Image: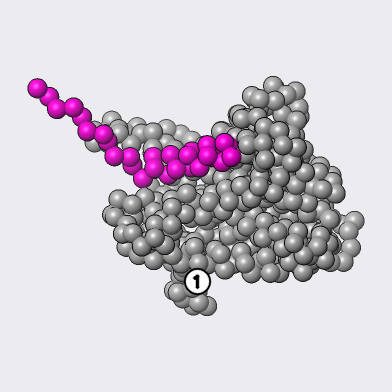
Amino acid sequence: MEHPRRFRRLTSFQTIILGFALVILSGSLLLMLPFSSRSGEVTGFLDALFTAVSAVCVTGLVVFDTATYWSFFGQLVIMLLIQIGGLGVVTATGAIVILTGKKIGLVQRSVMQEALSAHKVGGVVRLTGFIVKATFLIEALGALMMAPVFCKDFGIGKGLWYACFHAVSAFCNAGFDLMGEGQPFSSLTAYAANPVVNFAIIFLIVVGGIGFMTWEDMWSHRHHFRKYRMQSKVILCVTALLILLPAMYFYFIEFSHLSGGERIWSALFQSVTPRTAGFNTVDLTALRETGQGLLIVLMLIGGSPGSTAGGMKTTTLAVLLTSALSVFQRKDHPHLFQRRVTDETVKYAATVLQMYLVLCLTGGMVISVVEELPLLDCLFETASAIGTVGLSLGLTPELGTCSRIILIFLMFIGRVGGLTLIFAALSGSRPNISRFPEEKITVG
């Protein structure tokens, strides 16, 4: 008699996906409670699910204005979901286990390694502790910077709450805001010329988006850039270019009608926030189509691996560009900082690019057809969803059920990662060691 099969252990990728799904479901149920809304009414499941997905996936797309619709309890739930989503469900769980003093086994360490995009299992527990401590310290610093401004505008109690909420939202690259009481869905437009709020939000977004492993590298080697890992060097250089070049475009083209500090801060803020924070200090619908197109590209690129940000990642862009350059120069392998990039990495990068483009374009075209809206506007929303950004041209609250489900799917894919989802689905497949005959095909 054959013995029944034992329950198969979940892979690291499946554990990560299941963890995000459970947190999203729990958050949805909490947001459905009557005291989560200001009106005391029960929020529909789809609306609560959309908000929970947007918070856990640190996106920021909303169907209701966060300040005017949700009660303090609802806002607190959203902030906790943002914090868990920003750290990562596995990292947050690991931090709780560490605080309780329990031992973490090898399997759990392997899952934490995948969640953090760490290079090895060794030292992952220490790295998790460092990440949690640094996260709360940086968020506290951001809150302290913004507190005087918000306390002056809203009073001490409300001002402190606003400072804490926006510090968490900015560091986790979520884009949720509480500024809608004056004008719903206004984001930070009232602070377009305020240097303190602009600097604090930009600082939190950039620090949260460069990745936990880059932090560790910078903390260990300080100003000795040559000692950094290749990945850290790539992330810092690409991030700097993706801030500087778009800022120049916005300064000279889009915001030429502004003057003084407001022009500088607006240009800098709009170059940082698409990757992938979701705040805005100007009316995005007033931008040229070229500017909106540039924002779409930045949203798809996103932040860096192992960070609070989403998107294809800065390293993916760097690998694709250097791969193309190696082809132009007829080199056998692409190189970055005198290190060879493996063929496997190039394949992964190309796959990620294809996935994001296909999902963004398909989702945008479907929404455009279903809602009978301009394609560019719909692509802006889908790029914002899959890049877990949260910027919007004002379409999301007006979309129907089908379109909202599409955005939910894109936000989830964007946060857990397309490759993570595929690896989780195909974890049981066996590698194929046989090879077909080779034949060349002309491309380009």
Residue 435 x/y as whole percent: 26, 33
Quadrant into which the N terminus falls: top left
Residue 129 visible (yes or no)? yes
Q: Relative to residue 165, is residue 125 drawn left or right? A: left
Q: Residue at x 85, y 49 (%)?
A: 182
Per the image, the residue denoted by label 1 is 218
Colour scheme used in the picture?
one colour
Front-most of residues 296 and 154: 154
Residue 104 x/y as whole percent: 32, 57
Q: Is residue 160 magenta?
A: no
Name which quarter of the figure residue 261 lies in.
bottom right
Residue 314 visible (yes or no)? no
Q: Residue at x 67, y 40 (%)?
A: 35
For the stretch drawn in magenta, the main secondary structure is helix
Front-most of residues 17 and 143: 143
Label 1 neighbour load within 10 Å: few <14, some 14-19, many 20+: some
Residue 318 x/y as whole percent: 53, 54
Q: Residue at x 57, y 68 (%)?
A: 137
Residue 128 x/y as whole percent: 43, 61
Mark 1: amino acid: Met
Q: Residue at x 36, y 34 (%)?
A: 426
Give the magenta range.
1-30
> How many numbered marks are there?
1
Name which quarter of the figure residue 357 lies in.
top right
